[in-house]
Image (tube, rainbow, N blue to C red):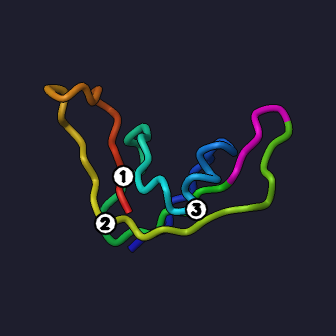
């Protein structure tokens, strides 16, 4: 298991925190795997990090699916 830290914009952060959003579309550069810990850190584009974050364990990673519109080099991480 590894820890993956990613920025997330405030409007998406709130949805994740409220457990309304349970996935994230990301560039596939961290080799995320089931069981890894994903730490999403709230980030304001012109202010920086807010200091708030949420932790979720990855349950599913979808990659290599261009036939469904997922570009190569990107993945969908579900928790």
- Report which quarter residue 79 is drawn in: bottom left
On the rendered structure, is 1 left or right of 56? left
Is 18 magenta? The answer is: no
Most prominent secondary structure in the magenta stretch?
strand
Residue 71 at what x, y percent from top left?
A: 29, 26
SS state under label 3: loop
- Report which quarter residue 63 is drawn in: top left
Q: What whole-number distance in Å separates the C-alpha atoms at marks 1 and 3?
A: 17 Å
Residue contact between numbered discs 2 and 1, judged by CB atoms under 8 Å: no
Residue 66 at what x, y percent from top left?
A: 19, 27
SS state under label 2: loop
User: 58 or 21, which lies in front?
Assistant: 21
Which is more foreground, mark 3 or mark 2? 3
* Residue at 35% across, 56% down: 78
* Residue at 47% across, 53% down: 21
Q: What whole-number distance in Å separates the C-alpha atoms at marks 3 and 2?
A: 18 Å
On the rendered structure, is 74 left or right of 6? left
According to the picture, the residue beneath numbered tag 2 turns out to be: 59
Judged from this view, the residue extending furthest toward the right is: 47
Residue 64 at what x, y percent from top left?
A: 19, 37
* Residue at 35% across, 35% down: 74
* Residue at 28% across, 53% down: 61
Q: Earlier in the sequence, mark 2 or mark 1?
A: 2
According to the picture, the residue beneath numbered tag 1 turns out to be: 77
On the rendered structure, is 44 left or right of 21? right
The quarter of the picture where the N terminus appears is bottom left
Q: Which region shows up in magenta?
A: 42-46
């Amino acid at each position: 298991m590894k820890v993956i830290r990613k920025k997330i914009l405030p409007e998406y952060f709130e949805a994740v925190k409220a457990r309304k959003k349970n996935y994230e579309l990301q560039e596939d550069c961290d080799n995320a795997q089931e069981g890894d810990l994903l730490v999403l850190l709230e980030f304001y584009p012109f202010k920086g990090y807010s200091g708030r974050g949420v932790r979720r364990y990855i349950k599913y990673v979808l990659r290599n699916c261009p036939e469904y519109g997922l570009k190569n080099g990107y993945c969908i991480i579900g928790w």
